Amino acid sequence: MAVFHLECPIHRRCASGLSVASERFDAMTNTQAIVEAEARFVALLAKRAGSAILWDDAGQIIWSTRRFVPEAGTAAAGAGQ
């Protein structure tokens, strides 16, 4: 079992404008950790924009992503969003 760290800055409509979720979890493989991180990231976003970084206990980044939310009334998000 290895330890992984997930950090997700999420854009929110509040005084600070940004919320940062920082979580630690165990997984058997990098692939398992990435699957868990992606699921958690989607849950944390709740239709907001944000980014995520997943690194192992040695400090190596093993996955990262960014998601944008299109503004109301605009066309669907482009590729990669």
Image (cartoon, rainbow, N blue to C red):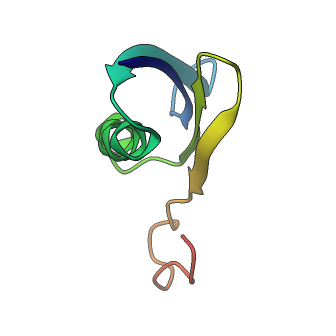
Seen at 31% across and 38% down, the residue is: 36
The residue depicted at 56 percent of the width and 59 percent of the height is: 68
Position of the N terminus by quadrant: top left
**Quarter of the figure with residue 40:** top left
Q: Is residue 69 above or below residue 40?
A: below
Q: Position of residue 23 (x, y in %)?
A: 44, 15
Measured as percent of width and height from the top left, residue 35 is found at 33, 46
Name the one closer to the observer, 66 or 34. Answer: 34
User: Which of the pair 10/63 is nearer the observer?
Assistant: 63
Q: Position of residue 4 (x, y in %)?
A: 48, 22
Q: In the visual, does 6 lie left or right of 60?
A: left
Q: Is the residue 72 above or below the residue 58 in the image?
A: below
Residue 42 lies left or right of residue 73; in this view the side is left
Query: How many numbered dots are placed on residues in this image?
Result: 0
Q: Residue at x 53, y 48 (%)?
A: 49
Q: Nearer the viewer, residue 56 or 13?
A: 56
Above or below — where is 47 with respect to 79?
above
* Quadrant that contains the C terminus: bottom right
Would you identify the image quadrant in which residue 57 lies?
A: top right
Toward which corner of the image does residue 11 lie, by quadrant?
A: top right
Q: Nearer the viewer, residue 7 or 35?
A: 35
